[in-house]
Image (cartoon, rainbow, N blue to C red):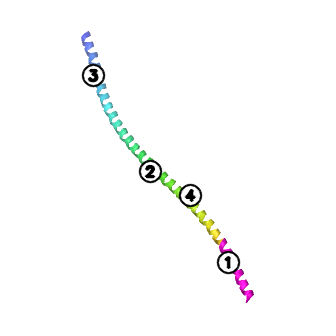
Amino acid sequence: MENFLLLSIFGVLALFFYSNSSTYKSLYHKLNEEKKLLEEKNANLIKLKDKFERQIKMSLDTITDSQDSLKSTRKELQELKIINNELEHRNRLLQERVDELYASVGNIA
């Protein structure tokens, strides 16, 4: 009777451990599948991050180049405005001189 009781307890324990081991194996396989999926998603996200970082870097370089170009253009524009103002002033002076010469010629005749 005691042997039967011990055998039945060991049998029940063996069934319990066997069923738990198969459950753990299936959970282990599911976890591995989930881990692989997460690793793939993580790799894709890293690729996207790298892609966006490169795009941002290129955009920043473009913006920097544009700013440099604008600065040089502004400087050239200011220089041209100064030259234009000087030429207008010289033109006014020459026009006044021409008017004075016409006036003096008119007085002589």
Q: Residue tagged by mark 3? A: 15
SS assignment at label 4: helix
Q: Residue tagged by mark 1? A: 95
Instruction: Tell me where residue 38 appears, x and y as whole percent.
Output: 37, 38
Q: Nearer the viewer, mark 1 or mark 2?
A: 1
On screen, residue 107 above or below 30 = below
Front-lying residue, 85 or 105? 105
Q: Nearer the viewer, mark 2 or mark 4?
A: 4
SS assignment at label 1: helix
Which numbered disc, 3 or 1, marks the residue that appears first in the sequence? 3
Which numbered disc, 2 or 3, marks the residue that appears first in the sequence? 3
Q: Which amino acid type is shown beneath numbered disc 2?
A: Gln
Q: Residue tagged by mark 2? A: 55
Q: Residue tagged by mark 4? A: 71
Residue range corresponding to the magenta coloring: 89-109
SS assignment at label 2: helix
